[in-house]
Image (cartoon, rainbow, N blue to C red):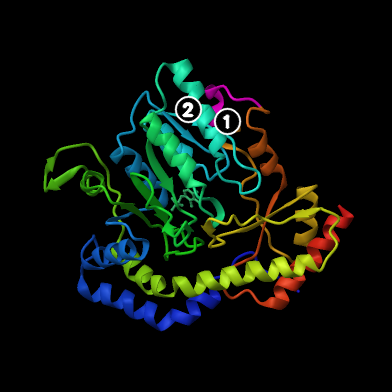
Amino acid sequence: MKVPFFDLTFMHSEIATELLSALERVLLSNQFILGPEVEALERELALYSGAKHAVGLSSGTDALLVALMAAGVGSGQEVITTPFTFFATAGCIARLGARPVFADIDPATFNLDPGAVAAVFEERSRKAGRPPSALVVVHLFGQCCDMDPILSEASRRGAAVVEDAAQAVGSRYKERHAGTFGAAGTFSFFPTKNLGGLGDGGMLLTSLPEVYEKSRMLRSHGSRTRYLHEIVGGNFRLDPLQAAALRVKLKRLNAWTEMRRKNARIYRALFAEQDTHGRVILPRESEDTFHTYHQFVVRVVNRESVRKRLGEKGIGTEVYYPRPLHLQPCFADLGYRKGSLPNAERACEEVLALPIFPGLGEEEQEAVVQALVECVKEA
Ligand SMILES: *Cc1c(COP(=O)(O)O)cnc(C)c1O
Protein backbone atom coordinates (compact mmCIF):
# COMPACT_ATOMS: atom_id res chain seq x y z
CA MET A 1 0.00 0.00 0.00
CA LYS A 2 1.32 3.43 -0.98
CA VAL A 3 1.01 6.14 1.70
CA PRO A 4 1.78 9.78 0.88
CA PHE A 5 3.60 11.84 3.51
CA PHE A 6 1.06 14.66 3.24
CA ASP A 7 -2.17 15.14 1.31
CA LEU A 8 -4.68 18.00 1.32
CA THR A 9 -7.38 16.14 -0.66
CA PHE A 10 -9.52 15.18 2.34
CA MET A 11 -9.37 18.62 4.00
CA HIS A 12 -10.01 20.55 0.79
CA SER A 13 -12.83 18.29 -0.39
CA GLU A 14 -14.67 18.90 2.89
CA ILE A 15 -14.69 22.65 2.26
CA ALA A 16 -14.38 23.03 -1.52
CA THR A 17 -17.69 24.85 -2.02
CA GLU A 18 -17.16 27.16 0.94
CA LEU A 19 -13.60 27.93 -0.20
CA LEU A 20 -14.72 28.83 -3.72
CA SER A 21 -17.45 31.13 -2.46
CA ALA A 22 -15.00 32.85 -0.09
CA LEU A 23 -12.63 33.48 -2.99
CA GLU A 24 -15.50 34.71 -5.12
CA ARG A 25 -16.52 37.12 -2.36
CA VAL A 26 -13.04 38.69 -2.46
CA LEU A 27 -13.06 38.81 -6.24
CA LEU A 28 -16.38 40.65 -6.27
CA SER A 29 -15.30 43.02 -3.49
CA ASN A 30 -12.46 44.44 -5.63
CA GLN A 31 -10.35 44.80 -2.47
CA PHE A 32 -7.07 42.95 -2.83
CA ILE A 33 -4.85 44.67 -0.23
CA LEU A 34 -5.77 44.36 3.49
CA GLY A 35 -9.40 45.33 4.21
CA PRO A 36 -12.32 43.48 5.85
CA GLU A 37 -11.26 39.85 5.19
CA VAL A 38 -7.84 40.39 6.74
CA GLU A 39 -9.35 42.29 9.67
CA ALA A 40 -11.92 39.53 10.23
CA LEU A 41 -9.25 36.81 10.25
CA GLU A 42 -7.17 38.90 12.67
CA ARG A 43 -10.13 39.20 15.04
CA GLU A 44 -11.03 35.52 14.74
CA LEU A 45 -7.50 34.25 15.31
CA ALA A 46 -6.91 36.62 18.24
CA LEU A 47 -10.15 35.38 19.80
CA TYR A 48 -9.27 31.73 19.08
CA SER A 49 -5.85 32.06 20.73
CA GLY A 50 -6.74 34.43 23.53
CA ALA A 51 -4.41 37.23 22.40
CA LYS A 52 -5.55 40.87 22.46
CA HIS A 53 -4.36 41.61 18.93
CA ALA A 54 -3.38 39.91 15.70
CA VAL A 55 -1.65 41.32 12.61
CA GLY A 56 -1.90 39.55 9.23
CA LEU A 57 1.47 39.24 7.51
CA SER A 58 2.88 37.89 4.27
CA SER A 59 4.49 34.70 5.64
CA GLY A 60 5.61 33.02 8.84
CA THR A 61 9.12 34.25 8.11
CA ASP A 62 7.97 37.85 7.68
CA ALA A 63 5.86 37.57 10.83
CA LEU A 64 8.97 36.55 12.75
CA LEU A 65 11.01 39.37 11.23
CA VAL A 66 8.32 41.92 12.14
CA ALA A 67 7.96 40.45 15.66
CA LEU A 68 11.70 40.79 16.27
CA MET A 69 11.75 44.34 14.90
CA ALA A 70 8.72 45.30 17.01
CA ALA A 71 10.38 43.76 20.08
CA GLY A 72 13.37 46.02 19.50
CA VAL A 73 15.90 43.48 18.20
CA GLY A 74 18.58 45.17 16.12
CA SER A 75 22.18 45.44 15.11
CA GLY A 76 24.84 44.17 17.51
CA GLN A 77 22.46 42.41 19.89
CA GLU A 78 22.53 38.76 20.86
CA VAL A 79 19.41 36.60 20.61
CA ILE A 80 19.17 33.11 22.08
CA THR A 81 17.35 30.42 20.10
CA THR A 82 17.31 26.72 19.24
CA PRO A 83 19.54 25.12 16.60
CA PHE A 84 16.85 22.49 15.87
CA THR A 85 14.25 24.39 13.85
CA PHE A 86 13.48 25.65 10.37
CA PHE A 87 16.10 28.08 9.08
CA ALA A 88 13.84 31.14 9.26
CA THR A 89 14.01 31.24 13.08
CA ALA A 90 17.71 32.14 13.12
CA GLY A 91 17.71 33.66 9.63
CA CYS A 92 15.48 36.51 10.80
CA ILE A 93 17.75 37.23 13.77
CA ALA A 94 20.78 37.45 11.48
CA ARG A 95 18.96 39.59 8.89
CA LEU A 96 18.48 42.27 11.56
CA GLY A 97 22.22 42.39 12.23
CA ALA A 98 21.80 40.56 15.52
CA ARG A 99 23.72 37.44 16.46
CA PRO A 100 21.97 34.08 17.00
CA VAL A 101 23.24 32.32 20.13
CA PHE A 102 22.18 28.69 20.27
CA ALA A 103 21.09 26.70 23.33
CA ASP A 104 20.71 22.93 23.10
CA ILE A 105 17.41 21.02 23.06
CA ASP A 106 15.76 18.56 25.41
CA PRO A 107 16.12 15.23 23.57
CA ALA A 108 12.71 14.03 24.83
CA THR A 109 10.64 16.89 23.37
CA PHE A 110 13.01 18.38 20.72
CA ASN A 111 12.25 21.80 22.25
CA LEU A 112 14.70 24.22 23.93
CA ASP A 113 15.99 22.84 27.22
CA PRO A 114 15.27 25.44 29.96
CA GLY A 115 18.49 24.45 31.76
CA ALA A 116 20.53 25.03 28.60
CA VAL A 117 18.81 28.40 28.07
CA ALA A 118 19.73 29.49 31.62
CA ALA A 119 23.33 28.34 31.11
CA VAL A 120 23.65 30.30 27.85
CA PHE A 121 22.20 33.44 29.51
CA GLU A 122 24.78 33.06 32.28
CA GLU A 123 27.70 32.44 29.91
CA ARG A 124 26.87 35.32 27.54
CA SER A 125 26.25 37.74 30.43
CA ARG A 126 29.73 36.93 31.72
CA LYS A 127 31.57 36.95 28.38
CA ALA A 128 29.74 39.79 26.61
CA GLY A 129 29.25 41.89 29.74
CA ARG A 130 25.46 41.96 29.30
CA PRO A 131 22.77 39.32 28.79
CA PRO A 132 21.34 38.60 25.33
CA SER A 133 18.50 41.03 24.67
CA ALA A 134 15.95 38.52 23.37
CA LEU A 135 15.00 34.86 23.22
CA VAL A 136 13.14 33.16 20.37
CA VAL A 137 11.44 29.94 21.46
CA VAL A 138 10.08 27.50 18.87
CA HIS A 139 7.15 25.23 19.71
CA LEU A 140 8.35 22.43 17.49
CA PHE A 141 6.15 19.83 15.78
CA GLY A 142 3.04 21.19 17.57
CA GLN A 143 4.20 20.88 21.16
CA CYS A 144 4.84 23.91 23.38
CA CYS A 145 8.16 24.52 25.10
CA ASP A 146 8.33 24.25 28.89
CA MET A 147 7.45 27.94 29.23
CA ASP A 148 7.44 28.55 33.02
CA PRO A 149 11.19 28.20 33.66
CA ILE A 150 12.02 29.82 30.30
CA LEU A 151 9.83 32.88 30.96
CA SER A 152 11.15 33.39 34.47
CA GLU A 153 14.77 33.20 33.29
CA ALA A 154 14.10 35.65 30.41
CA SER A 155 12.33 38.04 32.74
CA ARG A 156 15.17 37.85 35.30
CA ARG A 157 17.62 38.77 32.49
CA GLY A 158 15.41 41.50 31.04
CA ALA A 159 15.19 39.70 27.68
CA ALA A 160 12.19 39.97 25.35
CA VAL A 161 10.55 36.66 24.42
CA VAL A 162 9.30 36.00 20.89
CA GLU A 163 7.53 32.73 20.07
CA ASP A 164 7.92 31.06 16.71
CA ALA A 165 4.60 29.21 16.78
CA ALA A 166 4.64 28.43 13.04
CA GLN A 167 3.96 24.75 13.82
CA ALA A 168 1.79 25.30 16.87
CA VAL A 169 -1.49 27.04 16.07
CA GLY A 170 -3.96 25.77 18.69
CA SER A 171 -1.23 24.15 20.84
CA ARG A 172 -1.41 24.93 24.53
CA TYR A 173 0.82 24.98 27.59
CA LYS A 174 -1.12 24.81 30.86
CA GLU A 175 -4.28 25.81 28.99
CA ARG A 176 -2.71 28.89 27.42
CA HIS A 177 -2.27 29.06 23.65
CA ALA A 178 1.07 29.05 21.85
CA GLY A 179 1.88 32.56 20.69
CA THR A 180 0.47 34.34 23.76
CA PHE A 181 3.34 34.01 26.24
CA GLY A 182 5.91 36.49 24.96
CA ALA A 183 5.99 40.03 23.59
CA ALA A 184 4.82 38.52 20.30
CA GLY A 185 4.09 35.11 18.78
CA THR A 186 3.97 34.19 15.12
CA PHE A 187 2.10 31.68 12.94
CA SER A 188 2.82 30.48 9.41
CA PHE A 189 0.07 29.66 6.93
CA PHE A 190 2.39 27.76 4.58
CA PRO A 191 0.03 25.25 2.89
CA THR A 192 1.36 22.22 4.82
CA LYS A 193 1.03 23.85 8.26
CA ASN A 194 -1.92 22.87 10.51
CA LEU A 195 -3.72 26.03 9.44
CA GLY A 196 -2.47 26.33 5.87
CA GLY A 197 -3.45 28.86 3.22
CA LEU A 198 -3.53 28.54 -0.56
CA GLY A 199 -0.07 30.10 -0.74
CA ASP A 200 2.12 32.07 1.66
CA GLY A 201 0.79 33.90 4.70
CA GLY A 202 1.48 34.54 8.38
CA MET A 203 0.13 36.18 11.53
CA LEU A 204 1.57 37.94 14.56
CA LEU A 205 -0.15 37.79 17.95
CA THR A 206 0.47 40.22 20.77
CA SER A 207 -1.24 41.68 23.78
CA LEU A 208 1.10 44.67 24.03
CA PRO A 209 -0.38 47.85 22.46
CA GLU A 210 3.04 49.20 21.44
CA VAL A 211 4.04 45.92 19.69
CA TYR A 212 0.66 45.89 17.93
CA GLU A 213 0.99 49.48 16.70
CA LYS A 214 4.57 49.00 15.55
CA SER A 215 3.83 45.70 13.75
CA ARG A 216 0.98 47.31 11.81
CA MET A 217 3.26 50.14 10.78
CA LEU A 218 6.14 47.81 9.85
CA ARG A 219 3.98 45.77 7.46
CA SER A 220 3.24 48.88 5.38
CA HIS A 221 6.66 50.52 5.09
CA GLY A 222 6.56 51.98 8.58
CA SER A 223 3.68 54.30 7.89
CA ARG A 224 0.34 54.96 9.55
CA THR A 225 -0.54 57.88 7.34
CA ARG A 226 0.03 57.52 3.61
CA TYR A 227 3.47 58.79 2.47
CA LEU A 228 4.53 59.58 6.02
CA HIS A 229 7.17 57.06 7.11
CA GLU A 230 7.90 57.12 10.84
CA ILE A 231 10.09 54.00 10.84
CA VAL A 232 11.61 51.81 8.12
CA GLY A 233 9.42 48.79 7.42
CA GLY A 234 8.54 46.76 4.34
CA ASN A 235 5.68 45.23 2.42
CA PHE A 236 4.68 42.42 4.75
CA ARG A 237 0.91 42.33 4.19
CA LEU A 238 -1.32 39.25 4.24
CA ASP A 239 -3.53 39.28 1.20
CA PRO A 240 -7.32 39.11 1.45
CA LEU A 241 -7.65 36.06 -0.83
CA GLN A 242 -5.54 34.11 1.67
CA ALA A 243 -7.42 35.59 4.63
CA ALA A 244 -10.79 34.57 3.15
CA ALA A 245 -9.60 30.98 2.57
CA LEU A 246 -8.03 30.81 6.04
CA ARG A 247 -11.27 31.93 7.69
CA VAL A 248 -13.02 28.92 6.16
CA LYS A 249 -10.24 26.63 7.37
CA LEU A 250 -10.07 28.12 10.87
CA LYS A 251 -13.63 26.90 11.47
CA ARG A 252 -12.42 23.34 10.82
CA LEU A 253 -9.13 23.62 12.69
CA ASN A 254 -10.20 22.02 15.98
CA ALA A 255 -11.80 19.07 14.19
CA TRP A 256 -8.66 18.54 12.08
CA THR A 257 -6.46 18.84 15.18
CA GLU A 258 -8.50 16.10 16.86
CA MET A 259 -7.92 13.90 13.80
CA ARG A 260 -4.17 14.47 14.09
CA ARG A 261 -4.30 13.64 17.81
CA LYS A 262 -6.31 10.52 17.10
CA ASN A 263 -3.79 9.45 14.45
CA ALA A 264 -1.02 9.91 17.04
CA ARG A 265 -2.90 7.67 19.50
CA ILE A 266 -3.37 5.05 16.79
CA TYR A 267 0.37 5.08 16.02
CA ARG A 268 1.16 4.62 19.72
CA ALA A 269 -1.25 1.69 19.97
CA LEU A 270 0.08 0.07 16.79
CA PHE A 271 3.72 0.43 17.85
CA ALA A 272 2.88 -0.95 21.32
CA GLU A 273 1.84 -4.22 19.62
CA GLN A 274 5.23 -4.54 17.92
CA ASP A 275 8.63 -5.53 19.21
CA THR A 276 10.97 -2.96 17.67
CA HIS A 277 13.90 -3.89 19.96
CA GLY A 278 14.16 -0.24 20.97
CA ARG A 279 14.88 0.74 17.38
CA VAL A 280 11.90 3.07 17.08
CA ILE A 281 11.63 5.76 19.76
CA LEU A 282 8.23 7.43 19.84
CA PRO A 283 7.82 11.18 20.53
CA ARG A 284 7.06 12.20 24.10
CA GLU A 285 3.94 14.18 24.86
CA SER A 286 4.63 16.23 27.97
CA GLU A 287 1.93 16.55 30.61
CA ASP A 288 1.66 20.32 30.58
CA THR A 289 0.99 20.57 26.86
CA PHE A 290 -1.86 20.09 24.44
CA HIS A 291 0.02 18.65 21.46
CA THR A 292 -1.45 19.42 18.02
CA TYR A 293 0.84 16.98 16.16
CA HIS A 294 1.94 19.17 13.31
CA GLN A 295 4.40 16.31 12.93
CA PHE A 296 4.70 12.84 14.44
CA VAL A 297 8.46 12.42 14.70
CA VAL A 298 10.12 9.18 15.74
CA ARG A 299 13.80 8.43 16.20
CA VAL A 300 15.40 5.51 14.38
CA VAL A 301 18.94 4.22 14.02
CA ASN A 302 20.40 4.19 10.48
CA ARG A 303 17.78 6.74 9.53
CA GLU A 304 18.96 7.30 5.95
CA SER A 305 18.82 3.64 4.99
CA VAL A 306 15.50 3.15 6.82
CA ARG A 307 14.02 6.10 4.98
CA LYS A 308 15.27 4.86 1.61
CA ARG A 309 13.77 1.40 2.18
CA LEU A 310 10.46 2.95 3.27
CA GLY A 311 10.43 5.02 0.08
CA GLU A 312 10.92 1.84 -1.97
CA LYS A 313 7.86 0.37 -0.23
CA GLY A 314 5.83 3.47 -1.14
CA ILE A 315 5.77 5.01 2.35
CA GLY A 316 6.35 8.78 2.34
CA THR A 317 8.40 10.26 5.19
CA GLU A 318 10.32 13.50 5.76
CA VAL A 319 13.28 14.65 7.80
CA TYR A 320 12.83 17.77 9.93
CA TYR A 321 15.67 18.72 10.12
CA PRO A 322 18.75 17.08 8.63
CA ARG A 323 21.26 19.77 9.65
CA PRO A 324 21.29 21.90 12.82
CA LEU A 325 21.44 25.66 12.33
CA HIS A 326 24.75 26.12 14.17
CA LEU A 327 26.41 23.97 11.46
CA GLN A 328 24.91 25.79 8.47
CA PRO A 329 27.52 27.27 6.10
CA CYS A 330 26.06 30.79 6.44
CA PHE A 331 26.64 30.70 10.22
CA ALA A 332 30.22 29.37 10.04
CA ASP A 333 31.60 32.62 11.46
CA LEU A 334 29.57 32.22 14.68
CA GLY A 335 32.27 29.77 15.76
CA TYR A 336 30.28 26.60 16.50
CA ARG A 337 31.75 23.16 15.81
CA LYS A 338 30.43 19.65 15.46
CA GLY A 339 29.88 18.61 19.07
CA SER A 340 28.92 22.12 20.31
CA LEU A 341 25.24 21.17 20.71
CA PRO A 342 25.14 17.37 20.88
CA ASN A 343 21.42 16.85 21.51
CA ALA A 344 20.43 18.84 18.44
CA GLU A 345 23.09 17.16 16.32
CA ARG A 346 21.96 13.70 17.35
CA ALA A 347 18.31 14.57 16.68
CA CYS A 348 19.27 15.65 13.14
CA GLU A 349 20.74 12.20 12.53
CA GLU A 350 17.85 10.19 13.96
CA VAL A 351 14.53 11.94 13.35
CA LEU A 352 11.96 10.66 10.90
CA ALA A 353 8.52 12.27 10.45
CA LEU A 354 5.68 9.86 9.62
CA PRO A 355 2.43 10.75 7.81
CA ILE A 356 -0.14 12.19 10.29
CA PHE A 357 -2.37 14.47 8.19
CA PRO A 358 -6.17 14.59 8.69
CA GLY A 359 -7.70 12.10 6.29
CA LEU A 360 -4.96 9.50 6.77
CA GLY A 361 -6.70 6.11 7.14
CA GLU A 362 -6.15 3.53 9.85
CA GLU A 363 -5.14 0.89 7.26
CA GLU A 364 -2.59 3.35 5.94
CA GLN A 365 -1.19 3.81 9.45
CA GLU A 366 -0.99 0.03 9.82
CA ALA A 367 0.97 -0.12 6.55
CA VAL A 368 3.36 2.61 7.80
CA VAL A 369 4.01 0.82 11.09
CA GLN A 370 4.39 -2.60 9.41
CA ALA A 371 6.85 -1.22 6.86
CA LEU A 372 8.82 0.74 9.45
CA VAL A 373 9.18 -2.27 11.74
CA GLU A 374 10.47 -4.38 8.82
CA CYS A 375 12.86 -1.64 7.71
CA VAL A 376 14.46 -1.01 11.10
CA LYS A 377 15.11 -4.76 11.45
CA GLU A 378 16.82 -4.89 8.04
CA ALA A 379 18.76 -1.62 8.38
C1 LIG B 1 7.22 27.11 8.47
C2 LIG B 1 8.10 27.69 9.51
C3 LIG B 1 8.56 29.01 9.44
C4 LIG B 1 8.40 29.88 8.23
O1 LIG B 1 7.14 30.06 7.77
P1 LIG B 1 6.88 30.52 6.24
O2 LIG B 1 5.43 30.83 6.24
O3 LIG B 1 7.24 29.35 5.37
O4 LIG B 1 7.73 31.70 5.98
C5 LIG B 1 9.29 29.51 10.50
N1 LIG B 1 9.57 28.76 11.58
C6 LIG B 1 9.17 27.48 11.68
C7 LIG B 1 9.51 26.71 12.91
C8 LIG B 1 8.43 26.90 10.64
O5 LIG B 1 8.06 25.62 10.74
Q: CB of mark 1 within 8 Å of CB of mark 2?
A: no
Residue 160 visible from this viewpoint: yes
Secondary structure, magenta segment, majority class? helix
Vertically, is 17 above or below 218?
below
Tell me the amino acid under the disc marked 2. Phe
Q: Number of numbered discs present?
A: 2
- Image-quadrant location for residue 343: top right
- x%, y% of residue 135? 43, 36
Q: Name the residue under label 2.
A: 121
In magenta, the rendered stretch is 330-337
CB at mark 1 closer than 8 A to ligand 1? no
48 with respect to 276 (left or right): left
- Image-quadrant location for residue 270: bottom right
Vertically, is 65 above or below 134?
below
Quadrant of the image for the N terminus? bottom right
Please report the residue visible at 54 percent of the width from the left and 77 percent of the height from the top: 10
Say whether disc 1 or disc 2 marks the residue closer to the N-terminus: 2
Tell which of 149 and 225 is nearer to you: 149
Whether residue 336 appears in magenta in the rendering, the answer is: yes
